[in-house]
Image (cartoon, rainbow, N blue to C red):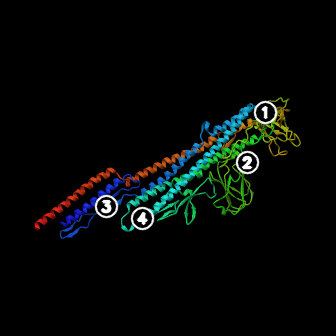
Amino acid sequence: MSGLLSVGTRALQANQVMLQTAGNNIANVNTPGYSRQSAVLQTSTGQFTGGGYIGKGVDIQTIQRNFSAFLTRQSALASATGAADSSRADKLKQLEGIFPGGTAGLGAAINDMLNAFSDVANAPTDLTARTVALTRVDEAAKRMRTASQNLDDLQSGVAQELSQKVSNINSLAKSIADINDKIARTQGSGQPPNDLLDQRDQLVRDLNQYVQTSSITASDGTVGIFLAGSQALVLGSTVSPVSIVKDDFGDPLKSKLAISRGGQAITLDENALGGGEVAGLLRFQNNDLVEGRNLLGRLTLAIGTSMNNQHQLGLDLDGNAGGNLFTPTVFGAGNILKPSAPATLNTGTASPALTISDVTQFVASDYEMNFTSATSGNITRRSDGVVTAFTSVPITIDGLNLSIPSGSANPGDRFLLKPFSTAASNINAEFSAPRALAVASPVAGSLGTGNTGSMQLSSLLARSNPVASTPVVLTFTGANSYTRSDEIPANATTFTYTSGQVIEGTTPATNPLSQWSLTLQGVPKAGDTFTVQQQPAAFRNLNAGNASAMTGLRDVAMFDGSALSDGYASLISQIGIRTQSANYSAQVSSSIAANLERDRTGVSGVNLDEEAAKLLQYQQAYQASAKMMQIAQGIFDTLIQTLR
């Protein structure tokens, strides 16, 4: 009878625990990170008798946490990747919005400006047409500055987000360390602290939303959390906080994630961070946003420089040589950033400088200069990693002249060159007086009055202002040859003529610089002449050769082979391609993360239908156990009455 009572008691307790466990699962069905629990039963050791072992019921062995370490880890990693791709894609959408198309875009302002000079070419003395052209110049400059300011605002927003997310990382790391300590204290109980383990796993999943981690479980039950593969964020109950720092060159437009250990900040390799929102934001800031700045800066610098150069080749209504249309870019401290963080590693005194040689060769990129000796080294174009070796300076690369005007370099010295990042921030129209618009060409050409051939003037462009060494008379000795009066001695050399060929206004014997560029069409006859001379004062105000030349700039191949007028479309295209690619990556990685999370919850999640069925099952078992207790009590009562 006592055995029956003991069996019933154990069964009653076991079924009560199973009911309680099922009820706990139902109560936590919506609790983030909760893993479904199950009561694990084991048969109590039977009592030996002559007739064999008599069972003594059932005991609760443990409360099991339904959990897959593999699926939990895979889900966290996929979630980190998805978070990185999504955060980068969101920012790229904002970057794309800074460069709109249509009439509100910078491209429309540039085309309107160039077209305005066409109107001036048709009426060079019309002050209204000149005023409209200068207004278009001012509007183009304003839109360039606005785009630059919008980039600065986006940069500021990313910096604030990074700061906030780093604070969240440190807070989560502290919470993981605290739970590590609690778990370590429960090790002596012999039973797993399921709720604490769930809380820690959820914190690790939350942490992976910000930065991808790897983990190692220690013998005391604590877990070590590592960043970038090997840098410990959490070890036991100890946390090494992270922070945002500048890169090796102290570039204010770039950031790195660093971890503090022993009072020193260790910069983490961005490429080793993996996923997480912080990694996605850093990639956007240090790559996508940099390219956006460089594309805008290249556009601004190329257009501003080419239009300034062309305007300087013209004459205004008062006969003065033209000045700058836009604020000229002067490379200096704001454009060339020397090493900042590793400054002590630079032992030389070199100070690099940049000047422009050819705007049509610009590549939207930063450059890193590394010296392997005092005069040699290599330059890495950061946009694509192309390396150019040099054995001496100055050196010309991608339309930029790089020199060392002062100091000298030592082996190991490094410099970051940023020719475009701030080019659009301070651009303005230089003047607003319509009379100062230099649309007349300083050079004129005329066919000989006695010409009998079919030769006609196609174009005559000035390459200097004023035009020296003029007048120059071309005398044709036949249909395919001519002599020049600026030869020494005059007309000493016979040159070959082809209709449509460009004739440069210089000869090596007189002047190494071209003063003008002439193109003639048709077939001359012997004795025909063409004269190149300075623009006569009487025709100066009626001439619009330089206005036509400025309009013609829109067809110059300037941006990776694209015409100047297509430069903005090229910019939009490059950013659009990045945005489209990032959106696709975000969609794929988010889908993978959702699938893996579904697999994880399939193991650890609570199914209400299943738990409801278990409640009925455990209820019946509990009632049967209670009936067993009731029977045992009845037998006991009958026995007592019999003994009486």
Of residue 30 and residue 277, the one placed in the foreground of this image is: 30
Q: Which residue is mark 2?
A: 357
Left or right, residue 404 beside residue 207: right
Residue 221 seen in the current view:
no
Quarter of the image with the N terminus in it: bottom left
User: Where's residue 285, x and y in %?
Assistant: 58, 51
Tell me how far mark 2 sits from mark 3, CA to CA. 80 Å
Badge 3 or badge 4: first in the primary sequence: 3
Badge 1 or badge 4: first in the primary sequence: 4
User: Where's residue 415, x and y in %?
Assistant: 67, 57
User: Where's residue 325, x and y in %?
Assistant: 73, 41
Q: Quadrant of residue 24?
A: bottom left
Q: Which residue is mark 1?
A: 543
Residue occupying image coordinates x 60% and y 54%: 254
Tell me how far mark 1 sits from mark 4, CA to CA. 88 Å
Q: Which residue is mark 4?
A: 182
Q: Nearer the viewer, mark 2 or mark 4?
A: 4
**Circles 2 and 3: CB atoms closer than 8 Å:** no
Is disc 3 surrounded by few (<14), some (14 to 19) or many (20+) residues within 10 Å? some
Check disc 4 and give the amino acid type.
Lys
Q: Which mark is residue 40?
A: 3
Label 1 secondary element? loop
Residue occupying image coordinates x 20% and y 64%: 5
Tell me how far mark 2 sits from mark 4, CA to CA. 67 Å
List the single residue furthest toward the front. Answer: 644
Label 4 secondary element? helix
